[in-house]
Image (spheres, helix red, strand yellow):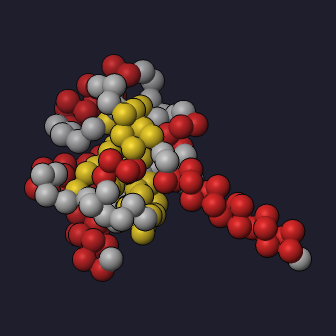
Amino acid sequence: MKKLLISLLLLIVCHANAQDNFSLTDTTGKQHFLADYKDKWLIVNYWATWCPPCLEEIPDLVNLYDARKDKDLMILGVAMEYKNAQEVSEFVDNMLISYPIVLGDTPQNKSIGKVEALPTTFIFNPQGTLVKTKRGLITRKQIEAVMRSN
């Protein structure tokens, strides 16, 4: 029983540390660490260029980011299942995405949590705690509701 409890505690600590120490590098080469955004809400949104719900939610994410980026919010978009970086860059330009974009599909970019569907959004509170994982379309209103309730 004691060994089981110790193993369980180690598993919890290892999982927490993977999330606490995550690092994502955006398309400009800047590294983003969870600790960089203490005192801000951090939204990490996994999406793909071919994904209709992703296309639908991006304008809400851009509007939310533009309204709050200098106050209490950071959004990182993680592009998944793309042909090449040029495709992602053109998509970002066409959609007027103003928040940083990370090229996904690497083990490092999957360390935040399991992405079983696109889009998937992880919401971290200003203390750096994951408070919500949303699979499927998310709206600005839903994000702001999470922010108000936590």
Residue 43 quadrant: bottom left
Along the viewing direction, whichever of 96 and 128 lies nearer the viewer: 128
Establish if 100 lies above or below 130: above
**Horizontal side of residue 63 vs 50, given as left or right:** left
Establish if 147 lies above or below 121: below
Residue farthest toward the bottom in the current orientation of the protein: 149
Percent position of residue 134, x then y: 43, 63
Specify whether residue 115 is in view.
Answer: no
Establish if 109 lies above or below 70: above
Name which residue lies at 71% across and 61% down. Answer: 10
Quadrant the N terminus occupies: bottom right
Percent position of residue 28, x then y: 29, 25
Specify whether residue 95 is in view.
Answer: yes
- Label count reads 0
Establish if 117 lies above or below 88: below
Name which residue lies at 64% across and 55% down. Answer: 14
**Horizontal side of residue 114 vs 53, given as left or right:** right
**Horizontal side of residue 30 vs 136, given as left or right:** left
Percent position of residue 149, x then y: 30, 80
Residue 26 quadrant: top left
Percent position of residue 150, x then y: 33, 77
Name which residue lies at 42% across and 38% down. Answer: 24
Along the viewing direction, whichever of 7 and 130 lies nearer the viewer: 7
Residue 50 quadrant: top left
**Horizontal side of residue 53 vs 117, given as left or right:** left
Name which residue lies at 71% across and 67% down. Answer: 9
